[in-house]
Amino acid sequence: MNIAELRSEVAREWAGQALPDLTELIRIPAVSPAYDPAWQANGHLHRAVDHVRRWLEGRHLAGVHCTVEQLDGRPPILVIEVSPTDGVGDQGTVLLYGHLDRQPSLGAWSAGRGPWEPYREGDRLYGRGTVDDSYSAYVAVGALAAVRAAGGLHSRAVILLETAEESASVDLPAYVDLLRDRLGDVSLVICLDSGGDDHERLWLTTSLRGLVQATVTVRVLDTPVHSGLAGGIVPDSFRILRQLLDRVEDSGTGEIRLPELNATIPDDRHAEVHSLAGLADRPRPSMPLAGTTRAVTDDAVEKILNNTWRPTLTVTGAAGLPGPGEAIPVIRDSTSLRLSVRLPPTVDPEVAARALTAALTVDVPYDASVEVTDLMLIRGWNAPTQSAWLTAALESAEQNVFDGVPSRAIGLGGGIPFLEMLGRRYPQAQFLATGAVRPDSNVHAPDEWLSIPFARDLTAVIAHVLDSHARTS
């Protein structure tokens, strides 16, 4: 490829095509189905899919065909099929993945910013879904367009944009089954829903933790009772919950006590973590710790392992607990906690969910009523070994896009269900999982933002990989 022309085309793509349309897309409150029970009636997911489809069809790119697929009762997906450039043999299909659904607004945003009101500040675009990960559609299309403009090659490609990733992608397997013949022999999967520690280099995701989410409710009364009358007679539901959680987690260290939720860390991942932790130029992601709060550990290796290969428990929500200003002296009838358990990449979430449920419901103190509901399971993922051609392609991208700054491999604490599912279905495929997220991108939080320059860089990287893939024999 002509590298100078590639850079120019990517810059033109983002200035004239991607950024204006992405900005308008963010105005659509396309909240994921798990957080919007009325998603069908509201129609925002369909609007988001149609928005991207109309944008792409309006560009009249040769060999590009868009369809919107919707199975009965399931949120829609956008499928973009792209014919190979002339002269490319059968190298298999490149499957590029992203999602158009988003988390809810979740809290107050800074003045002038809002989840559905995109706001440009310098090189940052603020809004819900800017970096998680509505930008992925524009990176994928932009990379294919840039390859062509720069005289490069690309194999047949399919861009798959779902609308339920934030709901654990529970409908995606059915759609992949539906599209099996159209996908063909997938030889390369590119996932653009990830990220790393900074925007100075390319970050390669090598593992993802799984997830078990559940709501546990302890009920001790049919109705609340005055605490002066019942205190010392009726056990407090919150105290019982504390005892139950102690079965799952050591509250002093955060260590998860259930063996089914732990896993042996592979030697290659241990080596990867030690190498990453020992880098002198590695950025040190900072968290907005309040006041004198300290991190769980200051050891760089332990910090990475804790976040990538060890289980952790977080209480993400509660019910039955009024605010301090509204609390009255009663023993409440029940307490509910929403639990989020991040799992090592190789742990089976179904096994973990059964162990968690048993720990919370067997031999309950005072024989209180306990119920575990609203389970959501996500499988983790451990990347396959990288092939020589992909390694060479990434080294070329490092030189031409990041001025020789080497890429880094890292596991991430979050989950992307698509990767594990595709890994099982296409065990011979190569996987490139990367993205524009960094620790302060405010994913799932107020003031989410996308680095526009890094989105351009990522587009150029994907173009290098597409061209290299098309030239493999």
Image: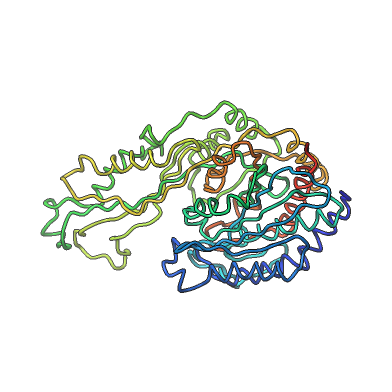
* Residue found at the far top of this picture: 267
Quadrant in which the C terminus is drawn: top right
Residue placed at 55% from the left, 49% from the top?
A: 287
Residue placed at 63% from the left, 50% from the top?
A: 183
Measured along the vertical axis of the image, is residue 190 above or below residue 249?
below
Residue 358 seen anywhere in this rendered image of the structure: yes
Residue 410, given in percent of the width and then of the height, sits at 62, 39
In depth, the one of 264 and 228 nearer the eye is 264
In depth, the one of 396 and 217 nearer the eye is 396
Left or right, 371 with respect to 262, comes to left
Answer with the quarter of the image where residue 150 lies.
bottom right
Residue 238, given in percent of the width and then of the height, sits at 26, 51
Residue 376, given in percent of the width and then of the height, sits at 41, 51
Residue placed at 43% from the left, 38% from the top?
A: 348
Residue placed at 51% from the left, 72% from the top?
A: 43
Measured along the vertical axis of the image, is residue 91 above or below residue 151?
above
Measured along the vertical axis of the image, is residue 315 above or below residue 122?
above
Left or right, 388 with respect to 197, comes to right
Left or right, 297 with respect to 184, comes to left
Residue 200, given in percent of the width and then of the height, sits at 73, 47
Residue 197 seen anywhere in this rendered image of the structure: no
In depth, the one of 169 and 334 nearer the eye is 169
* Residue found at the far front of this picture: 181
In depth, the one of 369 and 389 nearer the eye is 389
